[in-house]
Image (cartoon, rainbow, N blue to C red):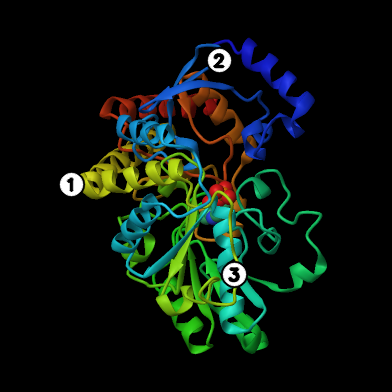
């Protein structure tokens, strides 16, 4: 493989874009490589500007659960665009989208559309604060909820990948209202409530952590959060920006049967266009302007192209009978393949998977169920693994602390190919 055009493109991009990218992890910094610039993609395949082809397991970081350029989604966007791209006035698209979300996500009775996952979580905590009249929130170390000030405190995703979990520019005033607990550690949450109970508006959590790599909630963890929140008059927010429509039609809340008060969504609901949403019980959502006093707005919120793409995506999911069983089958096949490869090569690693999301941690730990265990992973080894994977045509996340996503567009051959590439890479790592 040669990357000369991507190398040149990156040099040029750096002249006018900070770091050459519009979202940090894209720069491939933690894997010490030049990023590949993408030309086009279809189904499970992406092609870079040098003409190299890859099987894509990043899926635009989650949204593309039906693969790239799905014909029905492209056609819906085209059709909407012919009629105009934005009106700043209500459209039928928005009601259709809201009705689909309300129908599919169990705890959502009303939903407000925004333009990104970050906007969804920022708005959700304002709503929680406005509703409860309290100021503090509890978040988990290593969870990522976008780049809102309140969340860039011991944050996951690109922030840990680049060693920047606490960003300069977040004021001390903001930081003091974010209380930190440890994922899968209910005692740490109990303690925060014992000290600050009257002041805590909400607990916000990724029901499956995806931004320190995939870390599953231990049995009783989500139920425990539900109980603590209810007991203390705080709201429980599930950040389902990754897990929404991925683990089940009704997201992690359906998968684990634990209901939050507010849910944040993003990624899949946009069908590949910029969308976020937050929803919950009517009484809470009706606190938002114009019905209630809590303000939140957006010039492009509910954009017709984004709604057309998103609602087509949700209908595809709803109408594809074998959708979740197929995702599970393919992801399980990949999991088993990698486990066999680990056994064959004797490489020590932990593979965490739930549904179609997984992470292979290069660690000597026996399990990864906490932030500390995730952080024990050998990122230098991951960087080598990433390079070997890329060179064998497998596009995986350029960071140890992200997910590998299986999509409905992946064929059995794609899965066989990545299992073979994984074996080769593991053998190379042994040398
Ligand atoms: N919440 C979670 C769980 C996420 O994984 C992300 C992004 O990866 C966000 C929020 C922020 O979403 P966005 O990047 O669309 O702002």
Rounded to the nearest angstrom, the CA distance separating label 3 from label 1 is 35 Å
Q: Does the residue labelled 2 lie within 8 Å of ligand 1?
A: no
In the figure, residue 151 lies in which quadrant?
bottom right
Sequence order check, earlier mark of 3 and 2:
2
Q: Is residue 242 left or right of residue 140?
A: left
- The C terminus sits in image quarter: top right
Disc 1 residue lies near ligand 1 with CB under 8 A: no
Q: Do the residues labelled 3 and 1 touch (CB within 8 Å)?
A: no
* Camera-side residue of 375 and 301: 301
Q: Which structural element holds mark 1? A: loop
Q: Is mark 2 on a helix, strand or loop?
A: loop
Please state if 387 lies on the left or on the right of 95 as rendered. right
Residue hosting label 3: 125
| Residue 289 shows in the view | yes
Which residue is at the far left?
321
Tell me the residue that label 1 is attached to: 321
> Are there few (<14), some (14-19), or many (20+) residues within 10 Å of tag 1?
few
Disc 3 or 1, which lies upstream in sequence? 3
Query: x and y percent of residue 235 in the render?
Result: 51, 78
Question: Label 2: which residue?
Answer: 49
The residue depicted at 62 percent of the width and 84 percent of the height is 133
How many marks on residues? Answer: 3
Neighbours of disc 3 within 10 Å: few (<14), some (14-19), many (20+): many
Please rate how many residues cluster around mark 2, counting C-alpha atoms within 10 Å: few if below 14, some from 14 to 19, many from 20: some
Q: Picture coordinates of residue 122 (x, y %)?
A: 61, 62
| Residue 427 versus residue 360 in the image, above or below | above
Residue at (54% x, 59% y) in the render: 120
Residue at position x 59%, y 29% from top? Answer: 384
Give above or below for 125 relative to 64. below
Beta carbon of the mark 3 residue lies under 8 A of ligand 1:
no
Disc 3 is placed on an element classified as: helix
Spatial separation of the CA atoms under disc 3 and disc 2: 41 Å
């Amino acid at each position: 493989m040669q990357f000369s055009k991507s190398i040149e493109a990156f040099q040029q991009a750096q002249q006018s874009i900070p770091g050459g990218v519009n979202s940090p992890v894209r720069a491939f910094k933690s894997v010490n490589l030049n990023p590949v610039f993408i030309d086009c993609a279809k189904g499970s395949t992406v092609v870079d500007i040098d003409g190299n082809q890859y099987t894509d397991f990043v899926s635009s970081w989650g949204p593309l659960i039906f693969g790239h350029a799905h014909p029905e989604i492209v056609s819906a966007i085209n059709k909407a665009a012919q009629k105009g791209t934005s009106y700043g006035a209500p459209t039928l698209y928005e009601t259709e989208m809201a009705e689909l979300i309300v129908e599919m996500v169990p705890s959502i009775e009303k939903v407000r559309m925004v333009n990104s996952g970050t906007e969804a979580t920022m708005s959700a905590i304002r709503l929680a604060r406005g509703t409860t009249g309290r100021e503090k929130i509890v978040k988990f170390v290593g969870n990522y909820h976008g780049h809102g000030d309140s969340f860039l405190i011991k944050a996951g995703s690109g922030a840990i990948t680049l060693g920047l979990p606490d960003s300069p520019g977040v004021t001390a005033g903001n930081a003091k209202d974010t209380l930190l607990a440890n994922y899968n550690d209910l005692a740490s949450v109990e303690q925060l409530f014992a000290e600050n109970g009257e002041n805590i508006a909400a607990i916000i959590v990724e029901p499956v952590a995806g931004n320190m790599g995939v870390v599953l909630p231990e049995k009783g963890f989500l139920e425990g959060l539900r109980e603590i929140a209810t007991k203390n008059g705080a709201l429980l927010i599930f950040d389902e920006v990754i897990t929404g429509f991925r683990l089940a039609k009704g997201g992690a809340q359906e998968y684990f049967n634990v209901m939050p008060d507010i849910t944040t969504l993003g990624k899949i609901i946009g069908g590949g266009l910029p969308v976020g949403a937050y929803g919950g019980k009517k009484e809470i959502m009706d606190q938002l302007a114009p019905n209630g006093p809590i303000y939140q707005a957006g010039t492009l919120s509910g954009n017709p192209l984004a709604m057309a793409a998103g609602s087509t995506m949700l209908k595809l999911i709803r109408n594809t009978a074998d959708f979740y069983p197929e995702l599970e089958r393919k992801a399980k096949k990949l999991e088993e393949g990698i486990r066999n490869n680990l056994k064959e090569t004797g490489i020590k690693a932990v593979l965490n998977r739930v549904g179609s999301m997984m992470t292979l941690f290069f660690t000597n730990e026996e399990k990864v169920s906490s932030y500390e265990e995730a952080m024990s992973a050998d990122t230098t080894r991951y960087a080598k693994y990433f390079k070997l994977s890329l060179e064998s045509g497998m596009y995986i996340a350029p960071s140890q602390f992200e997910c590998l996503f299986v999509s409905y567009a992946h064929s059995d051959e794609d899965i066989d190919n990545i299992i073979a590439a994984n074996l080769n890479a593991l053998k190379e790592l042994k040398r």
